[in-house]
Amino acid sequence: MNAGQVFLQPAGAGTLTAQRWLDGRLQTVDEVVSEEVPVAFVYNGITHAVMLATPNDLEDFALGFALSERIVRQARDVYDIDVARHGDGIAIELRIASGAMARLQRTRQARTGRTGCGLCGVDTLQRFADDCADLPEVTAPPMRIAPAALHRAMAELAARQHLHHATGGVHAAGWAGSDGAIRLVREDVGRHNALDKLVGALQHSGSACSDGFAVVTSRASYEMVQKAAQAGIAVLAAVSAPTAMAVRMADRAGVTLAGFVRDGRHVLYAHPQRVAATA
């Protein structure tokens, strides 16, 4: 930071005192760290899930989580979102359509989500298999993304990770147009939370999930593909590796899955037809 330059601490970050070893000596310094708090999702007065998350973009998080977890089938089934901060965490109260609430009550299980949690609340292997089989197939209009656009999006996402730049401790999910220009970015300590926030932001902004693609600063695990497919996102590009389950799920759901999008290379694991073979 240059002399006289003012540091603006990003939302979702806090400052604490720490001991830093540098250049052979110990120093007392103020360190900027990412916040991680319990966030409870409450639907029509009933708590359904508690997730650990970064406490910013919470209305986006609430809407994206409700959609990607199939609590509601469409954004208009969420009538109201109210964020209430308490001493021990945050409660997000959502008022949802009666039909959605009836479905939720039939399958409701209280869940506590850890950072990186994938199967919280799934009580049997059959339930997990049923959830996977029930995934919608993405039927986005045909698109053809140039390799340069894929890599432009990942580079721009890295440049716009303001919370990560300050703390070094969060993931990001970004939405890019077909030219690779990043339009939206959301960050969180949990990679799946960041994607939920992005899905909610897309809905709140009125953006169509059929006219672009998503990039994430993480591995592509099964739940990332699941959330993308549920939102109608046709192309998901990750900076790191996918899992075998994620690849199989992407193939079944019609999602183009790209991994290792960095350093001028990428690997297409499912539905490669949406990414051009040459520059």
Image (spheres, grey):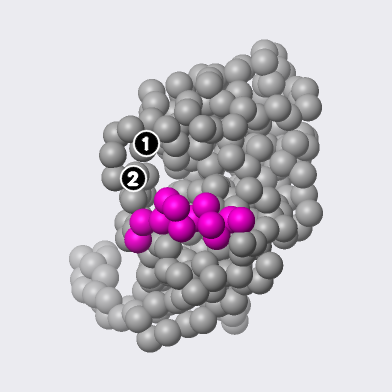
Residue at point 73%, 29% (across, down) = 140
Mark 1 vs 2, N-terminal side: 2
Residue 81, image x, y percentages: 62, 71
User: Can you identify the residue that label 2 sits on?
Assistant: 122
Residue 99 or 111: which is nearer the viewer?
99
Q: Quadrant of the C terminus?
A: top right
Amino acid of disc 1: Phe
Asked which quadrant contains residue 189, the reply is bottom left
User: Can you identify the residue that label 1 sits on?
Assistant: 128
Residue 248 seen in the figure: yes
| Numbered label attached to residue 272 | none
Residue 164 or 186: which is nearer the viewer?
186
SS assignment at label 2: loop
Residue lying furthest bottom in this view? Answer: 87
Q: Which residues are magenta?
A: 99-110
Inspect the magenta stretch and tell me whether residue 18 lies in it.
no
Q: Are marks 1 and 2 in contact (CB under 8 Å)?
A: yes
Inspect the magenta stretch and tell me whether residue 102 lies in it.
yes
SS assignment at label 1: helix
Residue 181, image x, y percentages: 74, 43
Amino acid of disc 2: Val
